[in-house]
Structures are given as C-alpha cells and as structure tokens.
Amino acid sequence: MSRPTPHPSPVSRPFWDACARHELVLQRCAACSAAVFYPRPGCPACGSTRLEWEPASGSGTLYSYTVARRATHRKLADRVPYVIAIVELDEGPRLTSTVVGTDVDALTIGARLQVDFEDDETVSFPVFRVVAP
Amino acid sequence: MSPPPSIVGVAELAPARDTGDETDLTLSAAVAVEALADAGLGPEHVDGLLTHPMDTASRLIPSTVGEYLGLRLGYADSVDLGGASAVGMLWRAAAAIEAGMCSVCLCLTAVPRTTSGAVAGAPTRRTADLSPWREFEVPYGNIGATEGYAMIAMRYEHLYGDTARARAKVAVAQRANAAHQPKAYFSGRPLEIDEVMTSERIADPLRKLDCVLPTGGAAGVVVVRGDLVGRSAHPGVAILGAGEAITHKTITYAPSLTDTAIRQSADRAFANAGVERSAIGLASVYDCYTSTVLLTLEDAGFCPKGKAAAFVDEHDLTWRGSFPLNTHGGQLSFGQSDVAGGMSHVTEAVLQLQGRGGGRQVRDLRHAFVHGNGGIMSEQASVVLGVVS
C-alpha cells in the first residue's frame, strides 16, 4: 500500500534521507535550543539560521487524532478506517502521522507512542505504534 | 466625527449543489449588480473592489472582475483568508475608506460548483501544491477540513467532556431557523437531535450532520463612506469594529487546538467597536462544523472555556430565542458555498439589522457579532455591526 508521495525541498531533504535509513531526525536551534519540526531554513522561535540536524528519540504522546471512516485520499482508500494523528514528540514539536497496529476504537489521547517506518517503493514514512504501558 | 463606513447593499444567490455553466465571474457579476441596486447605486459610483482567488484566472483577479463589471477603480485587491475572507473584506473596505483609498467598495464572493467536478480524488490545484502541507500532511490523509476539525473536537472532548448532544442541538436549532429562509438549501426539512447523533460516522467524533454540505453560490455587499449612507431604501449597517488573527495553516502546528485565535480576533473587534458582548443580539458565526460553533461561543467570549455545551443546553438558539444564532440556518443548513459561505453570515446580519429578516426577524436588534473562520481554524476575522441612528 502506498501513500501520496512527498516532494522534498532542499531544506527538508535531510529529513526524508534520514527516514530512508529508518531514523527520525529533528532540527535543533543552536541559538535558542528549540527543537523544530517541520524542517525550516530558520528557527520559528527566534529567527536564527543556525539549525542543526540531530537524532530524535522517536518517542511521543498522542496529542489528538481522528479515525477516518471515509477515505480522505484515493491512495489511502484500502486502509479505511485509518488513524490520522497529531503526535507530540518528547523533544516538543508536534507532527502529523498515523498510528498503526492498533484497534482504532481503543486509542486514547495521551497514549505513549514510538516511531516506526513504513516503506513503499521510493519513500520511508514515519508512523507510530502504541507502546504497551 | 463622521459616521463609520457602513454596509448599504447586500445580495445573495441561493446555494446550489450544481451551478451548471456559471463561473466565478458570472456569479460575481450577478451579485454585484443586485447588491448595487439594493444600495441605490450603480457601477459608476464604485471605486473600490475586493474579491478573492478564483478558478477563472490564475492571477490579476481584481482587474479581471473590475473589467468584467465595467468598474473604474482606485482600490482593488484579492483577499485570501478562506472562510474568513468575507469578514476580512469588511475590515479592509472600512480601512481603505478611512484611508481615503476609495469611498464605495464592492465586496464580492462567488464560487461555482459542479457535482461532477467534486469527485473525490479528482485533480485539483492542490495536487500541484509544494507547500509543507503537501509534504508532511497529505501522505497521512490530513487533507481536507473534516479530519482537521475532527482532531480539534477529539482533543476538546478529551479535555472538557463529550459534546455530541450540544453539537446536535446547534445543527437542529439552525435548521429550525432555516425554515424561515427560503434560500437555505435545507429550508423546510426539519431535523431531530437523534438524526444528527446517529448519522454516518465520517471522522471521529464528527458525524455527517455535524458537517456542512458543499454548495456553489455567491454573495456580495456594498460598503460606503459614512456620509454616503442614505441613497438606499434601507438603513446603513455600520462596521463598528473588527479584528483578525492568523496563527497557523495546518492544525498540527497551531499554538493550541482548543484555545483558538478567535479570542484575539474577537477581543480586538469588541475593543475597537466599544461594544460589550451583552449588547449582541445576534451571533452570526462561521459553522463549517457544529464543533466550530462551540469553540467560537467560548473563544469569542460568550461563555467560559469548556462550557459551550452547557451554554447551548441552556439557551434557545433560534431567531426568537435567548441567544439567536445563525438565523439564516448557518452554513450547516444554508449550504456552504466555499468563500461565499462566509459571506452568508455577513448578509444575514445586515438583513437582520435592517429589519429585513422576514419570518426569522430578531426583535429589537441593535448589534450583531459576525465571525469568519478560514482553513482549519487558521484564519480568524471578527466584526461588530450595528445600526447607527
């Protein structure tokens, strides 16, 4: 099963390259220490351009989610019902992803999550799995 | 002191599921002519124009529309604030008039729709998007409005408790209002609480009847310098104060999912107007989803945070009730014609303040609060309107 393919920019390319190695990376601002997602040329907190890539823990918390009962994209139609999730990473930033390998009706906000990667022909996508408490 | 810039003419087409061969331009022209006639003015009086991105042309929309209407303009612009565009137009028109850029400003919204063109997965302009949204949201299906608002509602209910019944009551009360607005798509089709609460699940916790029905349509208003009020057969409706706030594009990156920028936008509008919440006799607020209304009631300051469900439970939200809300049916019952849907909240407030509310007229109305909301709670625009005697 594939997903809509992202088209990385020069700024975001290192993120997707790391995903291909099954590594989740974030930018860290050398000036104000803010962790940054999604990738940017400048820090959205302080404006510094001294952003450096670093490995992320891959751990986070389910901040919110929905269960799509209808496909929201034709490439995702085979996955219905599927989870669209906002994950708050332990480093601070939130990102959009999905939660896989779980009963969609048993999910709860606040659930602890760990990143995993879903490979298609050209891209590795970060996805999340619930960590048993 | 000169009177504030005021709305003196309105026009609105009945929303339709399929507008056939109409284009943004033909629909714009239809409401422009009608709004000017309503104002007792003609194209020769217009020197300001506000429009919005259209499918008709990729660029130079204001001059395209202006030429089509035969206007000679001193001020023209395109407002790109999604559902907040219409309310945003009012502030821009008023500010442009006060800055001397124009004296009679047409604000037009028009969006055609064909049922065949709305097939899921059909190519749209969005598929060529190279924004971060396309890169980091679309692969996971976080694409349309419904999933974004669903995640907001899910977090809200996690923090403040289930709101399914209150959401349903909003839909039902607005449907009752629509019975007295013949242009409303769902006029004459009453709705019950249980119907809403058991309708098809779309994106948890939102169900089908929590969501608007996409339509095509058009609406426009004429805003004039205060001293020009009086040509119309109807009273002018003054733009007393406005506010805006834009904090994000994709909901994932919003400062908060549940404390929205509506607060900054509404606080600014009320402060600029010098009007208290208690003076508002009509709330005409953006309702893409029932849940949006609950957040708006709280963050616009009509009830405390987390208490919207109780507020809805305690009030009659119909035109004759204790808190008249979206008396045209809201977009939930009127139909959501994209950007023009946002204008429906403006036209309804103007008609009500002018005493043209027909069978749904709110009694003794002096002030209305109108709110526009774009994208996924991303663009917020508020305005306080009033009758100046």
Image (spheres, coloured by chain):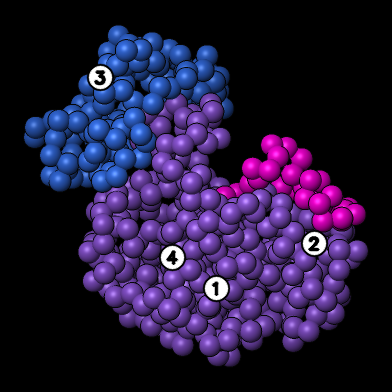
Chain colours: A blue, B purple
Q: Earlier in the sequence, mark 1 or mark 4?
A: 1
Side (left or right) of B171 relative to A42:
left
- In the rendered view, tell whether residue B215 sits above or below residue B316: above
Q: Which residues are magenta?
A: B54-83
Instruction: Please name the residue that numbered disc 2 is placed on.
Output: B105
- The lab-note entry on whether marks 2 and 3 share a chain reads no
Residue B115 sits above or below residue A41 on the image: below
Q: Are marks 1 and 4 in contact (CB under 8 Å)?
A: no
Kindly identify which chain the residue marked by label 1 belongs to.
B
What residue is shown with label 4?
B332
B123, B301: nearer the viewer: B123
Q: Check the image and report above or below for B273 versus B132.
A: below
Q: Could you tell me residue B111's position as x and y percent?
A: 61, 53
User: Which amino acid is tagged 2?
Assistant: Cys
| Amino acid type for the residue under numbered disc 4 | Leu
Foreground tag (4 vs 3): 4
Task: Tell me, yes or no, whether dots 1 and 4 are on the same chain.
Answer: yes
Chain bearing tag 4 is B
Question: In the rendered image, which residue does mark 3 sit on?
Answer: A117
